[in-house]
């Protein structure tokens, strides 16, 4: 048995988008155990629900994370609408689907760039983000903000996409889809990508299910589970199936995310074809009294917003359980047994969004 | 051959013009619906203070008792949510198409308005 | 088209029945979704949520704040160690038989157990204290 050394990884590291600390116990370049530790970016957002009225908490919910911000605000609104039993008009639900899927595409393109950066492929990183810029300009033209969309509110959406703008959106998305095929084909076929990702960070089906993995980490190990099948928003009216792979390694997770980009383009096209005319919001009166667990599918997995109201304007408890928090035990399992040089690739393959994890 | 996948992308991008913009010599044209910085048209403002009440961060402070009446906006606290724009009864507050440029000092932006003359007392009803 | 809100049954248990019920759920093929605690005036309400094929079920315990001890479920679901360490660090709950116990060092925070106070206690603690009046001569 070789000598054991402990190497601290993070919170500052060039490959991490956000600070997380891992103590890696090494035996001559092979990781034996990884001990995580978080709390560097804890802002106490859950306690803020005691000070801000529930209609203003949408702004806080949006700003929990920059990358997955729209779906956080959708989940908060869905949670409060579940407690107060508010009927959201159909056009607003379809618009929420369109923006939610745009947010998923932008998040996956961002992740593809960071993954290329993790194994040193800077050229591909820059190209992925160049395609993402085009998408962010489209988002800004429809919602008003590039990263924080600011379009969801309790009872509907704040802005509409009218007439000619819808045709522009379809045309622009076709361009962006063509540009993304160039990027994802490199991730699928390139030899250097395969050498760094095939067989690295393997987790099998039973372990992924029992350790509580969610999102692409679970789907790449063979379990078909996607919260969009629950039918919230307008997803009940659209046709799609979860994208599943069986290998359970980093390459499989990359393929799941690449396939989901094209699935999102298809879902947006379906939603734009079926969107009905009508109002985009309903008036909200009264205060929430009761509790509801809102479960939605973020780009990283299943997010859960627990809303508990007690009849006053302030919520009694607001709890956010983000997908990265649920993916930390599988990460610890995956790191045991890999080489030191593979640690950045494995950490990035669960798509860590630490500001979500620690709210 | 997998090698040609990436080399085609690399060679094409070397031959085309750059995808980046030479900022600050070239500024991006404004996009129509952007929620940019907040501006006030003080002549039409009635100082109803609804925007100050709706602002989630408390960036707007108004004083209608002072002469002249003042409207403070702290640009550092403003999160560009647009709640004030939606609730304004006279549509005096609006968002521009671009964000505020970077600055090197904190400070409020203040608009003032001369207080309107007090209403004349109604004549006593004749018996 | 009506908005679809799923059914979310909540089963109330007490502390002793928790581990047996969780073992039963694991045998039936459920996976752990989350563990959440709420601070009320006299006790903590802890909710354990499980999911199988999009069917959602929750268990709820009520633990008095003066006797804040709860048994661990890491024997059944090892992935629960993150949630239970968070309960220890943020709420001050003591969890017994934890398989991977960080001893309060999982969440590195400046203020210990920040969530261990209700809204009323937090506003009372933040209110300025009255200055003592000088004695009249």
Image (cartoon, rainbow, N blue to C red):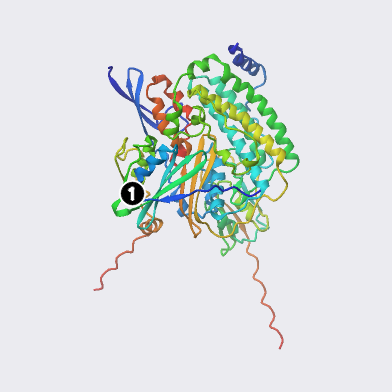
- The residue lying at 54 percent from left, 14 percent from top is A191
For the view shown, which residue lies furthest in the right direction? A164
Q: Quadrant of residue A145?
A: top right
Q: Is residue A211 left or right of residue A149?
A: left
Residue B22 at what x, y percent from top left?
63, 27
Farthest left residue in view: C137
Label 1 Cα crowd, 10 Å radius (few <14 / some 14-19 / many 20+): few
Q: Where is the C terminus of chain A found, in terms of image quarters?
A: top left
Total numbered circles: 1
Q: In front here: A338 or A87?
A: A87
Q: Chain of mark 1?
A: C
Q: Which residue is mark 1?
A: C15
Residue that appears at 53% across and 29% down: A111
Name the spot of residue C34 as percent of width and height, x first.
43, 42
| Residue nearest the viewer, comparing A173 with A87 | A87
Task: Using the image as rendered, state which of residue B88 and residue C131 is in the foreground.
Answer: B88
- Judge whether residue A159 can be spotted in this image: no
What is the quadrant of residue A234 in the picture? top right
Picture coordinates of residue C25 (x, y %)?
41, 41
Farthest-out residue, bottom? B127
| Location of residue A109 in the rendering, given as x and y in whole percent from the top left corner | 57, 29
Residue at 72% over, 32% down: A171
Residue A322: tell me if it is visible: yes
């Amino acid at each position: 048995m070789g000598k054991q050394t402990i190497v601290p990884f993070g919170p500052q590291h060039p490959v991490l988008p956000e600070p997380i600390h891992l103590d890696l116990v090494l035996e001559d370049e092979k990781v034996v155990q990884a001990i995580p530790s978080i709390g560097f970016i804890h802002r106490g957002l859950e306690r803020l629900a005691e000070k801000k009225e529930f209609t203003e908490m949408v702004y806080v919910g949006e700003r929990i994370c920059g990358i997955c911000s729209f779906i956080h605000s959708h989940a908060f609104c869905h949670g409060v609408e579940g407690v107060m039993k508010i009927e959201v008009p159909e056009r607003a639900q379809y618009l929420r689907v369109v923006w939610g899927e745009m947010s998923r595409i932008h998040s996956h393109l961002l992740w593809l760039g960071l993954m290329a950066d993790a194994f040193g492929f800077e050229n591909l990183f820059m190209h992925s983000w160049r395609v993402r810029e085009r998408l962010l300009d489209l988002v800004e033209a429809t919602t008003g903000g590039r990263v924080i969309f600011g379009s969801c509110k309790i009872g509907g959406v704040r802005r509409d996409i009218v007439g000619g703008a819808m045709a522009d959106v379809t045309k622009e998305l076709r361009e962006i889809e063509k540009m993304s095929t160039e990027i994802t084909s490199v991730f699928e076929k390139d030899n250097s990508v395969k050498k760094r990702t095939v067989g690295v960070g393997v987790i099998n089906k039973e372990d992924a299910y029992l350790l509580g993995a969610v999102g692409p980490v679970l789907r790449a190990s063979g379990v078909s589970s996607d919260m969009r099948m629950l039918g919230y928003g307008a997803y009940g009216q659209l046709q799609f199936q979860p994208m599943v792979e069986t290998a359970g390694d980093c390459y499989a997770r990359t393929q799941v995310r690449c396939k989901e980009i094209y699935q999102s383009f298809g879902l947006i096209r379906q939603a734009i074809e079926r969107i009905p005319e009508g109002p985009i919001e309903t008036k909200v009166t009264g205060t929430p009294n009761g509790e509801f667990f809102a479960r939605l599918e973020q780009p990283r997995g299943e997010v859960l917003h627990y809303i508990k109201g007690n009849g006053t304007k302030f919520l009694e408890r607001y709890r956010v359980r983000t997908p990265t928090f649920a993916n930390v035990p599988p990460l610890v399992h995956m790191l045991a047994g890999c080489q030191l040089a593979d640690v950045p690739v494995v950490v990035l393959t669960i798509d860590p969004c630490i500001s979500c994890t620690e709210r | 051959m997998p090698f040609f996948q990436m080399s085609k992308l690399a060679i094409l991008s070397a031959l085309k013009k750059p995808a980046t913009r030479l900022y600050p010599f070239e500024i991006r044209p404004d996009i129509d619906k952007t929620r940019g910085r907040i501006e006030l048209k003080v002549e039409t403002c009635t100082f109803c203070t609804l925007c100050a009440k709706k602002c989630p961060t408390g960036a707007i402070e108004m004083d209608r008792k002072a002469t002249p009446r003042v409207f403070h906006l702290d640009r550092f606290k403003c999160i560009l949510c647009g709640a004030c724009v939606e609730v304004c009864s006279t549509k005096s507050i609006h968002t521009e198409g671009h964000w505020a440029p970077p600055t090197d000092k904190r400070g409020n932006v203040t608009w003032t308005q001369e207080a309107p003359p007090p209403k004349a007392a109604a004549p006593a009803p004749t018996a | 088209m009506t908005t679809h809100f799923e059914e979310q049954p909540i089963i109330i248990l007490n502390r002793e029945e928790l581990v047996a019920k969780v073992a039963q759920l694991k045998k039936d093929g459920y996976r752990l979704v989350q563990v959440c605690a709420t601070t009320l005036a006299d006790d903590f309400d802890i909710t354990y949520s499980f999911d199988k094929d999009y069917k959602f079920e929750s268990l709820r315990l009520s633990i008095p704040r003066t006797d804040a001890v709860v048994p661990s479920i890491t024997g059944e679901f090892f992935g629960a160690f993150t949630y239970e360490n968070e309960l220890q660090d943020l709420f001050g709950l003591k969890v017994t038989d934890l398989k991977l116990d960080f001893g309060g060092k999982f969440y590195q925070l400046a203020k210990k157990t920040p969530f261990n106070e209700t809204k009323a206690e937090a506003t009372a603690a933040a209110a300025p204290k009255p200055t003592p009046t000088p004695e009249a001569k």
